[in-house]
Amino acid sequence: MLLRTATPKLRFALPTGHPENAQRAWALAMGAPLVASEGYALDALTQPDAPGAASLKARVAARMKTFWSVQDRRTLIATLNWLGREGHRIGHMARLTDYSVSPLQNIAERRKELGKTADYDEDARAELYRIDALLSDHLGMLKAKFLAFDTARAVMLVYGGRLHDWLSEDECWPYLFDMARDVQRTYESWSDYAEDFLRGRSFWKGAEFSERNVVDRLTQKLLSTRHSPWRLMWEQPLPPQVASARLRDVSEPISQGPVWWLERAGDAL
């Protein structure tokens, strides 16, 4: 029998459950499913000293190195800038477009080829799932934007950067607010954001939503829990973009995706 891991509690560091600054609370809320799954307090970018803090730091360091090849400030900035410029969404959108315009005969041949190895090849199974999800418009996949998934992952990495003192809070907030502005332009509500997060996560995994998966369950919990940060007003006013000598100015049309540029001129990669 498969055992289901308990859904982690939503942790908060402040008595009110949210930062005093509503703008910062909103920006942090974008990463809530992944941030909560790691065991961070949802309302504090800089985590409070508490029992288990050392264990959290060691666990996060191991996961960032294993899954992201991030092990210091330099590799973190490179990864955050990649998520801002391109992320998973560029490749996902290209694949979505390719399958959407391909003749059905070509898709059938592709499915047949993948089916030959799907029993033992995880990548083949994942690609079959993606094809079928697009053909059936599962989860509304044909209208996926894939921005929410990149955003949540970026917020999670910012938390990790603060935990290890690779980033200062002064560096983090402009990056987070740049994300937040683009998210508000792209989605209409937290529910809309959550739906696209699940589409992006499902497409990335090449697998269905699972009640046995902690992140998938947390996403549902955040939509229904009374004290969830996803109860914050969606139309929260955010700070305007401000040019900063500490941030490299990169001009790129919004249609090409957001530029959440964190790299300083002195940290050129």
Image (cartoon, rainbow, N blue to C red):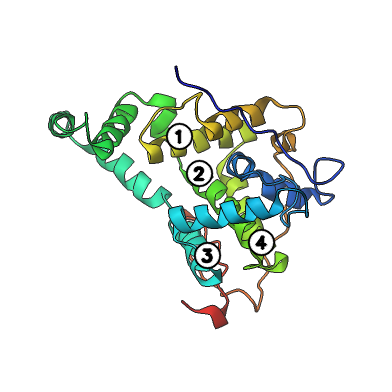
Q: Position of residue 207 (x, y in %)?
A: 38, 31
Query: Label 2 amino acid?
Result: Phe
Disc 2 vs disc 1: Cβ atoms closer than 8 Å? yes
Q: Which comes before the other along the chain, label 4 or label 2?
A: 2
Q: Position of residue 215 (x, y in %)?
A: 55, 35
Q: Which of 164 and 105 is in front in this view?
A: 164
Q: In this view, does 92 lie above or below 269?
A: above
Question: Is label 1 in a helix, a strand or a loop?
Answer: helix
Q: In front of the other: label 1 or label 4?
A: 4
Q: Name the residue under label 1.
A: 199
Q: In front of the other: label 4 or label 2?
A: 4
Q: In front of the other: label 3 or label 1?
A: 3
Query: Label 3 amino acid?
Result: Leu
Disc 1 vs disc 4: Cβ atoms closer than 8 Å? no
Mark 3 → mark 4, Cα distance in angstroms = 11 Å
The reply, left or right, for residue 104 in relation to residue 168 is left
Q: Name the residue under label 2.
A: 149
Query: Label 4 amino acid?
Result: Arg
The reply, left or right, for residue 268 in relation to residue 182 is left
Name the residue: 69% across, 68% down.
168
Disc 3 vs disc 4: Cβ atoms closer than 8 Å? no
Q: Which comes before the other along the chain, label 2 or label 1?
A: 2
Q: Name the residue under label 4.
A: 162
Q: Name the residue under label 3.
A: 76
The answer to whether residue 178 shows anywhere in this view is: no
Q: Which comes before the other along the chain, label 2 or label 3?
A: 3
Q: Which comes before the other along the chain, label 3 or label 1?
A: 3
